[in-house]
Amino acid sequence: MKKESSNIAYKPVRQVRKRRVNIGLLGVELEKASRGLYQPSESYCGYQFFLANLSPQADNKNTLDAETFLAALGITIFVVDELQLTLEEFITEEKFEDFFPEHEYLIEQGQLKESKKFRALEKLLQKRLGDVKVFRVGRVEVRCYICGLVNDGKIAGLVTTKIKT
């Protein structure tokens, strides 16, 4: 009996993996790579390493979303509701590729050294973290978290502040 082949094309599902890393070493690497860099805004704040635990319900996920991220920070939907905001008003997700200042902008500002450091930081974040995303939390004094999944049940990355007027 001849086996018939199917004409159905299956698209493989992209599986995002949590990176297994030495958390202490990761913190040192990220802080060293970001030293002297500032996120352009009215505040020009630097970057700091942060680490948060995923809730047990979210630990099985292989991707980060806004609600899961807020829960890791200890902020519930009820807190957002108390502030009389929608989730979309309180937290936004930005493409990682669009977060850091563009190379051309920094070159125009005469900041070639900073541009190279930002590109190196981007590569390090992509290499060391899984499912890298940027979450902006707040409305005026906005905390920007550049983060990804590491080890079982943890989120790690860098945080900075931007002022919106």
Image (cartoon, helix red, strand yellow):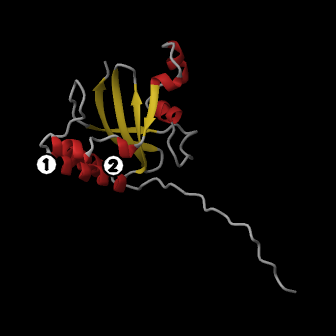
The residue at which mark 2 appears reads as: 23
- Whichever of callouts 1 and 2 sits on the residue coming sooner in the sequence is 2
Residue 59 screen position, x and y as percent: 53, 44
Label 1 – label 2 distance at C-alpha: 28 Å
Residue at the image position 25 percent from the left and 51 percent from the top: 119
The residue at which mark 1 appears reads as: 113
Residue at the image position 38 percent from the left and 44 percent from the top: 96
Residue 105 screen position, x and y as percent: 22, 41
Tell me how many marks there are: 2
Q: Is residue 21 left or right of residue 15?
A: left
User: Tag 2: Cα neighbours inside 10 Å, few (<14), some, or many (≥20)?
Assistant: some
If the image is split into quadrants, where does the C terminus sit? top left
Q: Is residue 12 left or right of residue 51?
A: right
- Amino acid type at image mark 1: Lys
Check the image and report above or below for 154 versus 20: above
Residue 155 in sight from this viewpoint: yes
- Amino acid type at image mark 2: Ile
Task: Assign a secondary structure to mark 1.
Answer: helix
If the image is split into quadrants, where does the N terminus sit? bottom right
Residue at the image position 25 percent from the left and 28 percent from the top: 41
On residue 77, the disc is none
